[in-house]
Image (cartoon, rainbow, N blue to C red):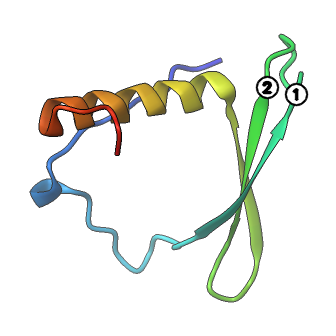
Amino acid sequence: MSMLKIQLVAGKVAPRYGREVLELAFHTAVITENGMGSGLPVVDLQLADKDGNAYFAAISGRQILALAEAIQGVNYRNHGSTNP
């Protein structure tokens, strides 16, 4: 499995996406217990474009936890609390 690259950027330098990038709305997360070969959970993120076409992205539970820890760290650094 490849490593998850997490980039922290200030709001003033956040990415600006052009028309060539498809914008998707995230509407459902499906957590499958024992979904990974290792027996760990996998999370399917269900998305849709403006025309209603469906897409999904699979992400491991460990990647979700890594993102949550990064967000908590940013909140603590910027606001003195790990809560959003």
Residue at point 44%, 75% (across, down): 20
Which three-letter amino acid code belongs to the residue tagged 2?
Pro
User: Residue 57's x, y, as percent?
Assistant: 69, 49
Kind of residue indicated by mark 1: Glu
Would residue 23 appear left or right of 35 to someone viewing this image? left
> Which quadrant would the N terminus be assigned to in this image?
top right
Q: Quadrant of residue 35?
A: top right
Asked whether, in this view, residue 69 is left or right of residue 13, the answer is: right
* Residue 41 numbered tag: 2
What distance separates the C-alpha of mark 2 from that of mark 1?
5 Å
- Residue 63 is marked as none
State the SS at label 2: loop
Q: Which residue was labeled with disc 1?
A: 33
Going from N to C along the chain, the mark reached first, 2 or 1, is 1
Q: Residue furthest top?
A: 38
* C-beta proximity under 8 Å, tags 2 and 1: yes
- Name the residue: 80% across, 39% down: 31
**Percent coordinates x, y for residue 84 in the rendering:** 34, 45
Residue 15: quarter of image? bottom left
